[in-house]
Image (cartoon, coloured by chain):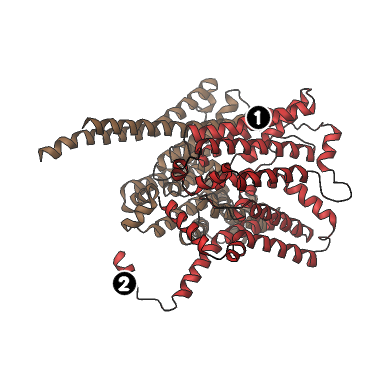
Chain colours: A brown, B red
């Protein structure tokens, strides 16, 4: 008994330390976010202290955050979903189309249909990945093209305009409760639910197990196929919800809606500390990453930097984040080895 | 560990097969066959496809894909990936344009662009090999970074004043044919890459790294150096493609060749290169790039929009990777017509 307790003391100390590091990872992004907001507000108080500024600060990242949450879940299982931008665009167009073609449909039904449609597209991705055992990158690269192509075939050069959608629906995109935009509240609820699921449920923990070592997870008897399938369905459904948000927020959907968002979503997750090699990260981090990306985008012109440089800043951020992750991992391993040698 | 084991099994299995099966029953051969089939069908059914000018446009269009697919094939055989190539094309285009705009002679500006390509590739290579980061993450970062530099340097302006001699050379046809001159540097590069990949220890090392990095290292392959060189090559060739792109359209813009990386990777994967590394042939990739080009020019001549072409590219890509699993599943099902009761499965779950 005493022996085990003496050996366990340093171990629990280390786990605490690792926990602190994990917190520090997301904490760092939060600091960066606060710094950006602070700098932009110092230069122009309207950035934060005006009703428009405050609303945009919360509203703009909400859509990307949803996509990034789904992307994070998929990436934690050591896969990647490059088709999210196309799924989002298709769902956004479907939302508009449903309002035009079936004006009698209630708004909640349209929202549910668009989310289900996204989930269906995610299911196709997941089924191809899970059953054919082909790398997700290749499959979702293929569906990125296919879904976008279907969108363009369907929409052509037409677009859904604000006048085609009911006022109540558009009010969702701009409405606020206690100065907090409704879409942001929905995104926060989704984020909290996803974070709770990933952290506290058996299913959520299994995603991490699968991502850390797929072969070991399989040997252990985890239902890898089902989990990977679920991850893709979740990612598709969240992209579908993001499509609904997109339609509500911008009121105008063309066939190119969401083009290129896949890289922003992967970027947000990577900046937020989700490792592309699976098993590491949190949906909180991904959402914070999305918030940082979008906030920097808005802050650059205010700080006197032309927004042409936005992508370069994003690139530096992504590279910085992964280098930092690598550095933390190396340090942690060194500390673990030291602790082992001491015990 | 598992990938290494399955790969070695696969290699062993491959060598048990008779030679004809190893040559003809491969993905590469299937793609070549599909290419010939599509060419014949298009020539028979699409009006105007069999005109020689079709070949001209086709090659002019896919030249950047063909060029960049060469180093990309080698990178992907080692199990890595470079997503930043499209952005590098844009950056090289902008550097060329900005150089000319500032009064440099075109040749100097182009050399500067090639240098930027080498530096960009070395940056990718440094982060992947020295810092030890996954190439997918690194090159998503540099995809944004290089594009950001390109767009940031020129903003929305486009440089369009290039020496007439050079712009016409980019579109010029080889005397007596409709084949554009860009084919010449491509064929030279292709020959170099084939020789390097198949006839040098360096090339064998590339396959070895993809099959098992550790085994390759223990057998004396300089894994890091090899990968670094490949990333530099990808940067250099992308920069060359960027200069060609600029001359062909006579315009240097920050958003030139956006999304090209996806087309290149689609061609490489369709051509039979495994994303896990260790497997792939250059001729399969060249055939796949040509197949994509032929499909899009035939469909365009048949008045099909480019969106349908995108759908077809995507579906083709998915089908080509899924087909192997489906075939394997069928073979397994055929070998065991009557399934034994699934006792093992029920106890496992």
Q: Is residue A288 above or below residue A133?
A: above
Judge from the rendering whether residue B265 lies leftward or rightward of residue A126; answer left or right: right
| Quadrant of res A27 | top left
Which residue extends farthest left?
A1
Which residue extends farthest bottom?
B338
> Residue A45's spot in the image, x, y percent?
52, 23
Judge from the rendering whether residue B237 lies leftward or rightward of residue A22; answer left or right: right
Judge from the rendering whether residue B168 lies leftward or rightward of residue A274; answer left or right: right
| Circle 2 residues within 10 Å: few <14, some 14–19, many ≥20 | few
Residue closest to the eye, B90 or B287:
B287
Label 2, on which residue? B343
Which residue extends farthest top?
A42
Query: Residue B116, which numbered label?
Result: 1
Labels 1 and 2 share a subunit: yes
> Residue B136's spot in the image, x, y percent?
52, 42
Query: Which chain is disc 1 placed on?
Result: B
Q: N-terminal of the two: label 1 or label 2?
A: 1
């Amino acid at each position: 008994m005493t022996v085990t307790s003496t050996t366990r003391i340093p171990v629990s100390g280390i786990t605490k330390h690792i926990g602190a590091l994990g917190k520090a990872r997301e904490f760092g992004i939060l600091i960066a976010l606060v710094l950006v907001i602070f700098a932009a507000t110092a230069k122009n108080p309207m950035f934060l202290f005006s009703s428009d500024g405050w609303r945009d600060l919360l509203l703009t990242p909400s859509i990307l955050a949803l996509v990034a949450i789904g992307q994070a879940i998929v990436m934690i299982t050591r896969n990647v979903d490059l088709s999210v931008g196309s799924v989002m665009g298709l769902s956004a167009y479907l939302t508009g189309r449903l309002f035009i073609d079936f004006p009698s449909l209630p708004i909640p039904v349209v929202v549910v249909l668009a989310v289900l449609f996204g989930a269906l597209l995610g299911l196709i991705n997941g089924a191809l990945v899970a059953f054919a055992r082909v790398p997700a990158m290749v499959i979702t690269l293929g569906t990125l093209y296919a879904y976008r192509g279907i969108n363009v075939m369907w929409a052509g050069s037409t677009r859904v305009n604000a006048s085609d959608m009911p006022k109540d629906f558009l009010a969702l995109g701009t409405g606020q409760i206690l100065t907090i935009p409704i879409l942001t509240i929905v995104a926060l609820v989704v984020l909290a639910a996803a974070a709770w699921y990933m952290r506290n449920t058996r299913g959520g923990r299994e995603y991490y197990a699968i991502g850390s070592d797929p072969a070991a997870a399989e040997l252990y008897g985890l239902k890898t196929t089902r989990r990977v399938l679920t991850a893709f369905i979740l990612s598709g459904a969240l992209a579908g919800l993001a499509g609904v948000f997109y339609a509500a927020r911008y009121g105008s959907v063309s066939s190119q809606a969401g083009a290129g968002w896949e890289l922003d979503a992967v970027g947000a997750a990577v900046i937020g500390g989700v490792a592309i090699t699976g098993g590491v990260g949190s949906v909180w981090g991904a959402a914070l990453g999305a918030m940082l990306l979008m906030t920097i985008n808005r802050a650059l012109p205010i700080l006197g930097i032309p927004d042409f440089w936005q992508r370069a800043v994003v690139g530096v951020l992504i590279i910085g984040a992964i280098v930092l992750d690598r550095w933390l991992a190396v340090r942690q391993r060194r500390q673990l080895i030291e602790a082992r040698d001491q015990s | 560990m598992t990938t290494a084991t399955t790969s070695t099994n696969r290699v062993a299995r491959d060598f048990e097969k008779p030679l004809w099966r190893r040559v003809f029953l491969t993905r590469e051969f299937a793609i070549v066959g599909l290419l010939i089939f599509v060419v014949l069908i298009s020539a028979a059914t699409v009006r105007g496809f069999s005109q020689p000018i079709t070949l001209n446009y086709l090659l002019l269009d896919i030249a950047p894909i063909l060029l960049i697919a060469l180093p990309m094939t080698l990178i992907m055989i080692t199990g890595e990936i470079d997503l930043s190539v499209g952005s590098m094309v844009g950056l090289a285009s902008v550097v060329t344009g900005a150089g000319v705009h500032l009064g440099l002679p075109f040749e100097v500006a182009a050399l500067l662009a090639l240098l930027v390509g080498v530096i960009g590739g070395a940056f990718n290579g440094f982060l992947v090999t020295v810092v030890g980061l996954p190439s997918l993450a690194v090159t998503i970062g540099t995809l944004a970074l290089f594009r950001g530099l390109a767009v940031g340097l020129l903003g929305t302006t486009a440089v369009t004043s290039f020496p007439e001699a050079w712009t016409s050379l980019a579109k010029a046809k080889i005397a007596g044919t409709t084949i554009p001159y860009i084919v010449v540097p491509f064929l030279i590069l292709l020959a170099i890459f084939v020789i390097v990949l198949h006839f040098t220890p360096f090339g064998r090392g590339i396959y070895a790294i993809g099959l098992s990095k550790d085994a390759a290292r223990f057998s004396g392959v300089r894994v890091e150096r090899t990968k670094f060189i490949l990333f530099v090559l990808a940067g250099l060739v992308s920069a060359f493609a960027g200069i060609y792109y600029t001359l062909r359209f006579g315009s240097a813009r920050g958003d030139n060749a956006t999304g090209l990386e996806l087309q290149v990777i689609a061609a490489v994967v369709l051509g039979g290169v495994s994303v896990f590394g260790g497997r792939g042939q250059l001729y399969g990739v060249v055939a796949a790039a040509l197949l994509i080009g032929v499909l899009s020019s035939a469909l365009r001549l048949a008045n099909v929009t480019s969106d349908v072409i995108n759908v077809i590219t995507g579906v083709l890509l998915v089908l080509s990777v899924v087909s192997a699993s489906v075939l394997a599943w069928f073979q397994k099902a055929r070998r065991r017509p009557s399934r034994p009761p699934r006792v093992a499965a029920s106890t496992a779950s």
